[in-house]
Amino acid sequence: MFSKKIIILSVLVAIFVRVSAQDVNLDSLLDVEMNKKVKSETQLTEATFKTSRLINGHTVETTQKGVLDFKLAHRFGTLNEGFYEIWGLDQASMRIGLDYGITNRLTVGAGRSTFEKQYDGFLKYRLLWQSTGKTNIPVSVTLLSSMMVKTLKDSIEHKQLETKDRFYFAYQALIARKFSTNFSLQVMPTLVHYNLVPTSDLPNNLISIGVAGRIKLSKRTSLTAEYYYQLPGNKLPGTYNSFSLGYEIETGGHVFQLNLTNSTGMTERTFINETTGQWKKGDIHFGFNISRVFTVQKPKALPGEAVSPEWAKPETASAATDSIKRKLTIGTFRSIRLINGHTVETLPGGVLNVNISHRFGAINTGLYEFFGLDNASVRLGMDYGLTNRLTIGGGRSSYEKEYDGYLKYKLLRQQTGERKMPVSLSLYSSIMLQTLKNVKTAADTIQKQSSDRYTFAFQAILARKFNNSISMQLMPTMVHYNIVPTSDIPNDLYSVGAGLKLKVTKMSSLTFEYYYQLPGRKLPDTYNSFSIGYEIETGGHVFQVHVTNSTGMTERTYITNTYSQWDDGGVHVGFNISRVFTVRKPKNLSNL
């Protein structure tokens, strides 16, 4: 009996050892096969940099085939200009460009800068792509060739430039390596050719070397730096090396970059060879870059790439309301502003909203002004949710150097269920201060006193979300002027606004906004404000492009001071950007 147990135990141990041995052998074989597979395939290194531009200059990245990349670069004036100019806010230059991926390695692009009314175009080809596996390439190499033309009239004193003298060319080899998921470095030997240089002792070909780097801070954010060293004997008089620092945020199809630089221009000629500012003297420009990609032709996925777009993620807000007996209506509008004016929405408690509103000049200014591109105004603002119903905010506009602040309270909220409420209602109050010097009345006889520079606005914003596709709101408004141009004009001007949102896709909408000024309650020679917008929501961003006949971006300026008409081309193209940050965790919907 004992011997049988020994035999059975021995057999079980043998089977266990056999199985264990097979398991080990199978695992080893699997590892070997996987290693063979990895070595037999080429693994391309992705995302050396987040986008095809770092701060001023290009990165080694190219735009994917069939993808259109909309670029917007903005530089304010220098920080040392002081408080009156709000440290450069009122002096801004801009470049708008489009890049398109002909193939995954070849990109073509063009742009227009307000600085010196400059046009540029480029070709960019990725010659080598950092990779591991079957093909081991330690670096990526991209070749760049660009052409620039300056169209500013009479740019040289006492001498009119010939057409050929307005052209400039740049050639770069962009050499980069992604050392880890957190660190990338790039070197950029550069030659810029001038068809005409200021003096005969200067060479037409100016050589410089750039260095750029990116340090990843989180899944979506990075710190960037960029420096261009001009070789001795290869620099223009009175110029300095360009040095820039940046902070970039990626959200879905957006890359948003904040930067500081001593360069004003945004083409190779201007930021590499014509930087006249010095960091030590405070000649520093604050600015931002926006990159937004659109798929024109669906690109092929690169080896090992799995695309999971931000907009494909399921929404969770509706799930939150399912558990609430009184089902609150959410998302009547995408953000707290429609186009110029406010929506019925308030911010959740503890949420900070940073917004930028930008308005170009009128389209009817013609080609030389690039249909208003060179005449722009901007408003920078911040909004904060004190509670889920109460929002405060303020901003600064370059137009008439105006400051504004407001309070908005959501009195009623549309809801269904046990407690029905057919509409939402928010009460809004704002104060505006015009600080432009030497502003006089229309009669041009007296100087404005400090109290005369203040204007006030009061609104009731009544809104209803009819379904997932349509939302509407009405905005009865009173704007109070402490001083008006003539005695026959009342200090209180009344208007009624209307807003509409039409959902186009899950993450985009068409918006409309109109303000009707009541008879006898309007300033002379002003018109009703009408605006059309198209907005895209991606993660924490809301990006909106719009057209409007209003220049200003406060209640006083767009409701009662609109002097342009749609029918004579007095239309301004503009954009709004809204980005939210959680300062403290907001309460959920059930606590509203």
Image: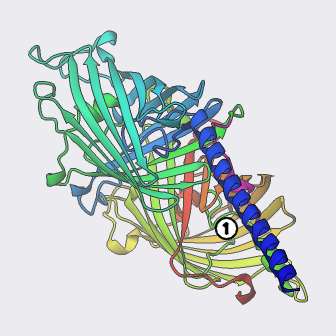
Point out residue 272 in the picture as x, y percentages from the top left corner.
Answer: 26, 33
Question: Does the magenta-highlighted stretch encompass residue 314?
Answer: yes
Query: Is 320 above or below relative to 220?
Result: below
Residue 308 as seen in the image, left or right of residue 268: right
Coordinates of residue 389 in the picture (x, y in percent): 65, 83
Left or right: where 249 falls relative to 292: left
Tell whether 234 sits left or right of 75: left
Q: Position of residue 467 (x, y in %)?
A: 87, 64
Task: Count numbered badges in the picture.
Answer: 1
Q: Nearer the viewer, residue 550 or 85?
A: 85
Residue tagged by mark 1?
A: 343
Question: In the picture, which quadrant includes the C terminus?
Answer: bottom right
Residue at image position (50%, 74%) is 393
Rendered image quadrant of residue 89: bottom left
Task: Give neighbour class at mark 1: few <14, some 14-19, many 20+ (Cα, 10 Å).
Answer: many
Q: Is residue 176 visible?
A: yes
The segment highlighted magenta reads 301-315
- Specify the amino acid type for callout 1: Thr
Q: Residue at x 74, y 53 (%)?
A: 509
Q: How is the image coloured?
A: rainbow
* Residue at 11%, 28% in the rendered image: 232
Left or right: 227 in relation to 589: left
Q: Is residue 5 above or below residue 68?
A: below
Q: Quadrant of the N terminus?
A: bottom right
Task: Judge whether 538 appears above or below 36 on screen.
Answer: below
Classify residue 387 by image quadrant. bottom right
Residue 281 forms part of the magenta stretch: no
Q: Main secondary structure of the magenta part?
A: loop
Q: Secondary structure at mark 1?
A: loop
